[in-house]
Image (tube, helix red, strand yellow):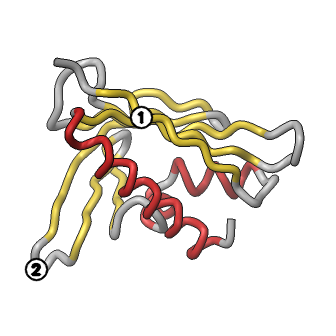
Amino acid sequence: MDKQRLCIERELMSNSAQIIWDLISTDSGLARWVADSVTQDGEQLTFVWGELWSHHEVRKGTIVEKIKNEYIKISWDDEDGPDNFFELRMDKSHITNDYVLTITDFAWEDEVDSLKTIWNDNLARLRNSSGI
């Protein structure tokens, strides 16, 4: 059984490519909204949720594709298969001139709702921390 593809689009209140790109492609940007801490060593990213001194989760991912001001694709090191990644893509809206963030991720059928909730919470953190 394959994982289900999840695609979430959110219009951001920003028409600055540099601001959006920094938020989706740098460890400091990702730490503002995806995880409590993100560190980068070359193409390797370490995501930490929770406090290191108490219960926490650590996952490592590798940047497998990146085109500046377009998208970044990160595969999880602890998973195999064609659906072991998530992608953050930025596209300019021709109507509002703001950027639209498209998140593509994958989950098992019984985890799709949880993953949607996680990404929606992440997007709320993005709006709260950056105003976009």
User: What residue is rendered at 58% in x and 75% in y?
Assistant: 128
Tell me: 111 left or right of 34: left
Residue at 69% across, 58% down: 19
Apparent side of residue 65 relative to residue 83 in the rendered image (left or right): right
From the image, tell me which residue sits under label 2.
54
Rendering coords of residue 123 (x, y %)? 52, 60
Say which element carries label 2: loop
Identity of the amino acid at label 1?
Leu
Q: Which of marks 1 and 2 is nearer the N terminus?
A: 1
Q: Residue at x 23, y 43 (%)?
A: 111
How far is mark 1 from mark 2, CA to CA?
31 Å
Query: On the rendered structure, is 96 left or right of 109?
Result: right
Can you say whether 126 is above or below 65 in the image? Answer: below
User: Could you tell me the amino acid type at mark 2?
Assistant: Ser
Q: Which of 32 and 132 is in front in this view?
A: 132
Q: Name the residue under label 1.
A: 6
Q: In which quarter of the image is the C terminus?
A: bottom right
Q: Residue furthest bottom?
A: 53
> Foreground: 103 or 4?
4
Q: In this view, does 128 lie above or below 119?
A: below
Residue 36 is situated, as x and y percent measured from the top left of the image, at: 34, 70
